[in-house]
Structures are given as C-alpha cells and as structure tokens.
Amino acid sequence: MSSTPSHAGRWLVLVAVMLAFLPVVLDMTILHVAVPTLTQALGASSTQVLWIIDIYPLLMAGLLVPMGTLADRVGNRRILLVGLTLFGIASALAAFAPNAPLLIGARMLLALGGSMIMPCVLGIIRRTFEDDAERAMALGLWGTVGAAGAAIGPLIGGALLEHFWWGSVFLINVPVMLIVAPACYLLLPRAEVTSPGKWAIGQALLLIAGMISLVYAIKAGFGGKHSLPVVLVVLLFGMAMLGLFARKQLNSSEPMLDLSLFSRPAIVAGMIMAVVATGALAGVELTLAQELQYVLDKSPLQAGIFMIPIMAAAAVGGPVAGYLSNLLGLRIVASASMFASSLALAYLALSDFHHPGIMVPLMLAVLGLMLSIGLTASSIAIMGAVEAERGGAAGSLEATGYELGTGIGITVFGVFMSAVFGHTVVVPAGLSPEQSAQAAESIGDTYLVAQQLSPEQAEALISAGKAAFTATHSVLLSTSAGLIGALAVLVLIMLAGYREKGGAHH
C-alpha cells in the first residue's frame, strides 16, 4: 500500500486535515471579542487577561517543533488523532472554568492539543502533494481555512456572546471535534513513511524550556511587570537552553531539528514574514476589537461584523497567492503584498472610525488580502524548500513562526497600548489614588473603575478613556505600518537568490 493516495483520495485527505485545523485557528482569535465579557464575568485582572490570551500561543511556540519532529518519527496520523482528542477535552474544561487560573490551565491543555494538530496538518499536505503546482494550490486552500477560521473567529465569538455565556466560545469546539476526529481516523492513510531514529525527549525539553523562557522574557520585559534583573535572568536562561539545544543538534547523530534548514534563505525569509505578518494581524485585530466595543459602544457581534472585510479578503488571499506566485514569481508577490499592507495600515491609522464611509472597510479589505497573500507566500517558500520526509519539521518551523508572531504581536501591542494609553489618558479629578492608577492601566480597567463611581464621574472617566484609546490606536497602527514597510524591503533583498521551482537548493 503506497503512502501517496490516489488523485481523488488526495483532495479528500486535504479536506480532512483542513477540518482538523479549523478549531485550532478559531481558538487563536475567537477570544478577541470575548475579552471584555470574560474580564467582567471572571473579575480577571489585566495580567490574568493577558495570560488567558497569551498562554496558548506561548506554549504552542515551545511545543510545535518537538511535536512536528515527533510526528515525523511515529506518524502524523497518530499524533493528529491524539491532538484532536486532547483539544476536545480541553475545550470542555475551558468552557466551564469557574475562575481565571482554571481557565488558564485549560488553555494550556488546549495548546498541547493544538501543537500536535498544526505541524501534522502541514506535514500531511507536504507528503500527500508531490507535484509543485498542486502543492501551491493545496497550501493556498489550507491558507484559506487558516485565514477564514481566524476571520470568522470574532464573528462566531460575537454571535455566541449575544445569546450565551462566555464559555460557549470554547464549548463550540466540542461538536466540531466529534465530527473531525472520526473523519480523520477514516480518511487518513494508515501506512505512513516515518523518518527513522528515536525522538529525544531531553532535546525536546531543552527546546520547550528555551522557547517559553525567551518569549516570556520578551513579554515581561516589554510589560514592565517584573524588575529588570528578573527579566534578564529569564532571558539568559532561555538563551542558554536554546544554545544547549543548538549544540546538541549539531553534535547529535540523530538531531531533533535539522539546523541546516536555516541555511536556506527561502526558509529564513519565510519565517520572518510569518512572524511579522501574523504579529501585525493579531495586534491590529485585537486593537480594533477593543476600539469598536469600548469606544464606539458596539456589541461583540457588531464588532465582528465591522471586521468582516479583513476576514473575507484574507480568506481569498490563499488561492490568489498560489496563482500569482506561479505567475509572477514568489519574490515579487511576497514583497509587494507586504508593501501594500503597510500603506493600508497607514491609511487606517489616520481614519475616523466614527464615520467609516466606504474607505475604511475598503482599506480593511486591502489589509486582510495583502497580509494573507504574504503569509501564503511564506508558506510556499518554506514548504517548497524541503524534501517530503522533512515536511513535519518544516511545517512546525512555519507554524512556530505563526505562534511566535501571534504571541509576541499581542504582547507587544498590548504593552505598547497600555503604555501609550497610560500617558494619554487624563483621569478626571475626585478619584482615589488607587482608582486613578487602575483607570490608567487599560481601557478595560477604566470601565471597571467607572462601575464604582457616581454617574457623572463615571461618564467623565469613560469619555476620557475613549479619547485616550482613539489616540492610542492611531499610534499603534502607524507603528505597524512602518514595521511592515521595512519587512517588504527585507524580503525583497533576502529572496534575491531565490529561483522558482526548487530554487531552494543552492
């Protein structure tokens, strides 16, 4: 029995893994609209809220590469099915979590399941589609599910919150898993070519500890939540672990992660694009969701609807990118899409959301389309640069880029947001020092403090918070525009030597 299914079978396999991937992506964004509701229902502090959102991408960032290489050893199908089961169980636990710490725990279990699902999906696609043009199409369709999932996340979240309690945003995964897990069990080929060798658990633990410490140090450092010495210790610990991991990889006869992959410019350029583009997208979506609900007083559902242009356009980006990069070459498509995204962001930074007109939705659509084309291009660059049996490892590298981007993006945006907000907000007189300090933390805190005040004071405080947040969101969007513009130039330079069709092998 061959491990490559028949023609019709190939596309069925693609459908099965795309379904498996959907809940994982939904979970990356479904919380964005739920944050205000959840904060108030659980009485979560702003630190706890950051952890509830961040623990998922943080752990995923540490676990993806070990799980991807484990899947290359024992078979993608097995790891995928275990991941789906875990994900379903964790979703049920998260839905009924009575307080913030338990919700954070359930999100940790969700991340473990998700880190098993993501690399397997990419690895299975890489193994199933040997032909370059077919694979570019398959990755384009996969990208559509990714973008559409991330896109409808806030919409589904908003719709659920209109009718049910916040836990429903997790509970929705359970019926999905009950359909997807059996489908994957039946559709995916039992026989798989696996790469030989043991899976070194010691190396895995070094990598997980290193990645998590590194990302946590970046978060804590930007957040100013801990003293500088603490941040430096965690940072040095993380770098030491990653250094040890790298040394083991270079000296081991059976390395977990082949570091020579990083000598291929296409892979490095793809990774950088994945990190920056997802970071910007996640940060922008989170900023917008808060602006729409806190400043424009939209319900979660209305906020989700307002963001449809980003989502709808992002969903089309995948296949468009596959088609364009076959036509114009990857280098042009990748850098042009980044450049266009930065222009759209700059326009949005100067727009007035109270009177969106036609231009704001249009620019949101341009932004979604271009970032999604850029991400699919990064996927085509990375997956085209490796052989089939290393698909899981390359897939996990790319997915790590996404998770790092999302995790760091949300943190940097969140921290940057509260710093700018704290500087711009003018707290009205008559509040106690504690109340003033809390109200300047974030716009969510402004609303929590306002609940303790008399109607006049509350109104004054909320309008001060709204004014400060609008200013903050302009600063954030202009900064991301600058970052992505710089990325466009970098990608143009890095992919200079990239030749289409096997352009990776120098």
Image (cartoon, helix red, strand yellow):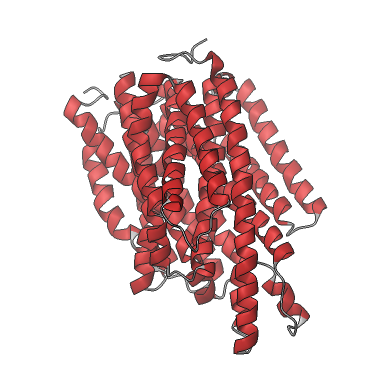
Identify the residue at the far bottom of this view.
454
Percent x, y of residue 98? 48, 74
Is residue 138 depicted above or below 366 in this figure? above
Is residue 174 depicted above or below 319 in this figure? below
- Point 73% across, 76% down: residue: 436
Percent x, y of residue 388? 38, 22
Which is nearer the eye, 316 or 55?
316
Q: Is residue 460 left or right of residue 257?
A: right
Percent x, y of residue 282? 51, 49
- Point 69% across, 59% down: residue: 420
Is residue 466 depicted above or below 402 in this figure? below
Q: Is residue 262 left or right of residue 88?
A: right
- Point 44% across, 50% down: residue: 359
**Is residue 443 in view from this perspective?**
yes
- Point 24% across, 48% down: residue: 182
To which quarter of the image does residue 313 belong?
top left
Q: Is residue 76 left or right of residue 332?
A: left
Which is nearer the eye, 1 or 180?
180
